[in-house]
Amino acid sequence: MNTKLIIELLDDSLGHSVQTWEIDSAHSVQIGRSPDSDVSIRNPYVSRCHACIVPKETGWVLNGISSQGVIHEDQIIQSIDLYNDIVIRLSRRGPLLRISIGSEQGESKTDDLIAMSTIAHEDFAVPLLFLDKDERDQEVAEIEKADYFSSLKGIAQQLRAEKNNKR
Amino acid sequence: MAKIISIHSFRGGTGKSNTTANLSVLLASKGKRVGVVDTDIQSPGIHVIFGKSSGDFQHSLNDYLWAKCPVEQTAYDVTQSAIGTADPDDQQIKLFLIPSSLNTGEIARILREGYDVAKLNDGFQQLINKLNLDYLLIDTHPGVNEETLLSIAISDHFLLVLRPDKQDFQGTSVTIELARRLEVENISVMLNKVPESMDLELLKEQVESGYEAEVVGMLPLCSEMAELASSGLFVNRYPQHRLSQTLARIADRLV
Ligand SMILES: Nc1ncnc2c1ncn2[C@@H]1O[C@H](COP(=O)(O)OP(=O)(O)OP(=O)(O)O)[C@@H](O)[C@H]1O
Ligand SMILES: [Mg+2]
């Protein structure tokens, strides 16, 4: 059987790959925040030991370990048979992963990805700027509640109206 | 019609003051009348970049806020020292600095008593009118407080400065969202202290998609700026440097 797996960490909003792991193994693959995971992802929403991928007779199966869950098509899943280019999310607010299963026909694509992975494995120069939008919205709501915020909004609107009149 | 441009960052030390000072020089050099207000009353400092010390000023913004003098008396003409090539008689190139007091007693008083935010706003409008300004640049205190929010609320252009850093990134998103709720028309982002090794395209994409706002420039982390240590105006000292050229493009975007 084919033992090649390509796991890509995707940019949440753009969907392109920001880090790639190429794994050639007949053994299981650990995914988690722990630095000694095979696929180590430094993201606050990833558990130290989040999921693992184990080989089957034909293909692979991914098992969730963390109580934060593994999400596939909006469902928390315990276990799923991998198909080529499957996309899963590690915990509700965590990162997206795309997993490709090397296939005979897909060799050229795989080669490209291997070349990319060589680059990505060298220390990652751009930090993964992670935006927690819920936290942001909560903070904004707090500030918006304050009295002075609405009075400021009033001042600003009035000033803009005056300016527009002068124009 | 004068434009108010607020320069802000969520955290301190991002390079707001240096950015503000250098942009003010670039804007004035285009033949504009520009005022720079230091509203960082808690930790003032932009005057240092203009080569001034507190002894050079008789009045500061604080005096106006305590109703000790009219606001135009707190404005100092720094055109000659900041733009050596400007003709002193040319009324169309002018740069004014409105400093905050460095006196620790003054700073303590502001922290203790606060001040009238509406008065600060009146002060901005009077400066524009009395000095006949084309641009008023506001160097703000980091973080979110009442006077910062006022500066944001009344600005025509809100420029956020951040470093490529996770904490800067998260915090700045709050300020941007607040500016949107305050209906600020133009919101843009400038990255500063970007290490040479970073992939600029990727960085830009991440920031723009996270904020849904435009990145108008990315300034490199550089030893020349660090060694200058706020003792002068970078664009005058190193006009050919990539950092100066990026700032010039940002200034073009602000006019
Ligand atoms: N691109 C750069 N490369 C290297 N050093 C820089 C760069 N930009 C700014 N600095 C340095 O960082 C320090 C802080 O800059 P500055 O005072 O402009 O920041 P600030 O945001 O106004 O800080 P504060 O929040 O304290 O007011 C200064 O010593 C300055 O020389
Ligand atoms: Mg400053």
Image: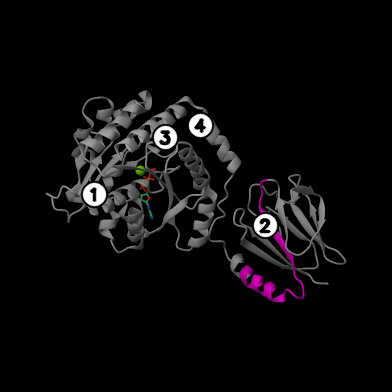
Q: Quadrant of the N terminus of chain A?
A: bottom right
Q: Earlier in the sequence, mark 1 or mark 3?
A: 1
Looking at the image, is mark 2 or mark 4 nearer the viewer? 4
Mark 2 nearby-residue class (10 Å; few <14, some 14–19, many ≥20): some
Question: Do tags 2 and 4 sit on the same chain?
Answer: yes
Mark 3 nearby-residue class (10 Å; few <14, some 14–19, many ≥20): many
**In the figure, B100 relative to B225: above or below?**
above
Q: Residue at x 64, y 58 (%)?
A: A10
Amino acid type, mark 1: Lys
Q: Which residue is mark 3?
A: B149
**In the figure, A55 relative to B21: above or below?**
below
- Could you say which disc has been placed on residue A55 in the image? none
Mark 4 nearby-residue class (10 Å; few <14, some 14–19, many ≥20): some
Q: Which residue is mark 4?
A: A143
Looking at the image, is mark 1 or mark 3 nearer the viewer? 1
- Could you say which disc has been placed on residue B32 in the image? 1
Looking at the image, is mark 2 or mark 1 nearer the viewer? 1
Q: Could you tell me residue A147's position as x and y percent?
A: 47, 25
Q: Dividing the picture into quarters, in which one does residue A61 lie?
A: bottom right
Tell me the subunit letter for badge 4: A
